[in-house]
Image (tube, grey):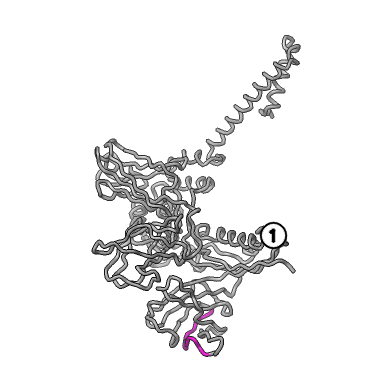
Amino acid sequence: MIQFDFDSIKQRIMTTLSSKSEWAEFLSFGTNSLLIDSIAQEMAYQVQYKEYLTFENWWSLARNKSSLLVTAPIHGYKVPRKIGASGNVLVSVGENFDQFHNRDIFIPKFFQFSNGDTFMCSSSLVRMAAGETSVSVPVRQGEYKQLTFLATGTVFETYDVISDSVENSVYELYVNNIQWTPVTNLFEYTKNDIVYEINTSPDFKKVTLKFGNDVFGKKLNPNDSVMFRYISTLGSKGNISSINNITTVESQAYDDQATAIDLFVTNNEPIVGGFDFPDIEQIRYTSPRVFQAGDRASTREDYQVSIEQLDFISKATVWGVYEYNIDRGESPWTFVPGEENVVHLAVLNSAYENLDVAQKNQVINMLYPKASPTDIITFESVDIIKLIFKVNAVVSNSSYSLQAVKAGIDLALSDEFSIENMKFNQNIYASDLARFIDEIDGVRNHNTVAYIEQRFTFSSAYVSSIQTSLFPINASTSNIYIKKKTAHDSTYTQLGYIDNNGDIHGVKDPVTLDDIYTLSGSNISLGTGAGILLVQNGLADDYESYELKIVYTLSTPDIVLKNRAQILSYIGSDITVSYPF
């Protein structure tokens, strides 16, 4: 096979020239040799460049994101932008989070908090009612930005926002103070629809706002005032894993009489889930699937691809009667009254939370034109199963720092099993988990147990039902905990423990051995995870002020999900490391 590297090209030139009598005596001169070297090198470069272009023009061979993203619009695929970390902060008018104001206080969307360096914006309007001592505010990592411009009135007018940090889903656009709706494709709308597209450039350096032409979407008129509000996010660099880290209120709050109010803030949970742009393999996999789905929703894959293209969606899974029968162990073609033509959707938004009513309506409005008129679309509540890994590891030798190995284990677990990287109905098998930690640098051997944490509340005065997401339960490693909701710095304390019969007993004072809590009649089925909690003694405050959780392990080593709407999510770890004796 003919080779086109430098040496091969030069050798062929030399062979050709040496065969000609008029060149034979000149080849030995240094100047000629240098000229031949230069020609051969340039020819080799040219071949390499053409080979590069050939690779980049083939979808399966391209090695640059930009090569795929130039073609992706043909598929109908729009690359998602950076996703800001999300979570909740606790806000109060009192420094100790135990005071209240006598009027309603409003915390608007894009209200800002920070730790001095990293900014958080409220992702929706929140009202703290008169008399409330605190309120939980959903936030997205990023700094609030606003830009305005006057329209020129051209058809399909565009405007570039020069930034690589426009958050993927938290933004708003107003034309003459009227909010317009972002859509995926203007060509699906009419001249009266006040809609616009927001597209990311192939180099990720800007986003482009695109408006209609009075045929496909309403056209901007000359001198229309356009305002675009968004947050500039750090993506994965904006994750906050520690609590009580966000403590500064950056914006000014007001009550319902327009009186300025000073607020205090803290985060009593991590704010995580920040993501950067998708990598090249994610683009290579997703874009053709979008094209294959087209404008129809006739298969499970069509539904899923269409839903995941909405910019406020992070994950989705879809199933119908076929999968319903498989899950029951029946023949896939068994007729099931009430399930025929039902399309089940389990969907998480970009904050990895269940959809609100407005988001569900957007999904429905997108799907119905594509779906069969006989399809019955129903949303299933996603059950996010929170995992805590307890690891006792022995380090290979003293050349490894204990702290470095501990940090490495935590980083590996948080990355591998974060909700961002987990899939619906994805199980964790003990052998795979053991092998995964074995392969972490510096780990000689280890003992690892995965705990499941599930929170719940009292439904009436110190009475609560319990239903664990997974079962059967291992009683010896399962406990009930309690804390006050209103105290931002409060921690869970143990309320009770479960015996081998499933009875729940209150913990005792370690000195007097008297019961701290009386839980007579409380029990849980170890086989099904269903139970009831009854607290007769030990609590004094209003039952609604308490938050409960059960932390448990399974009696089997594997973590196997029970239904298609469940997904696992890492929330923390308890790691001890030591050197071998």
Disc 1 packing (10 Å; few <14; some 14–19; many ≥20) = some
Q: Looking at the image, which is closer to me, 570 or 241? A: 241
Residue 77 placement (x, y as % from top left): 44, 45
Quadrant for the C terminus, please.
bottom right
Type of amino acid under label 1 = Tyr
Horizontal and vertical percent position of residue 441: 67, 58
Residue at left offset 35%, top offset 45%: 197
In front here: 188 or 44?
44
Residue 298 in sight from this viewpoint = no
Q: Which residue is mark 1?
A: 400
Task: Using the rendered image of the protein, determine whether residue 209 is visible from the camera's viewpoint.
Answer: yes
Quadrant of residue 464 in the image?
A: bottom left
Looking at the rendered structure, the secondary structure element under dot 1 is loop
Relative side of 227 to 236, left or right: left
Q: Which residues are magenta?
A: 514-526
Asked where in the image residue 61 lies, by quadrant, the reply is: top right
Q: Is residue 214 left or right of residue 10?
A: left
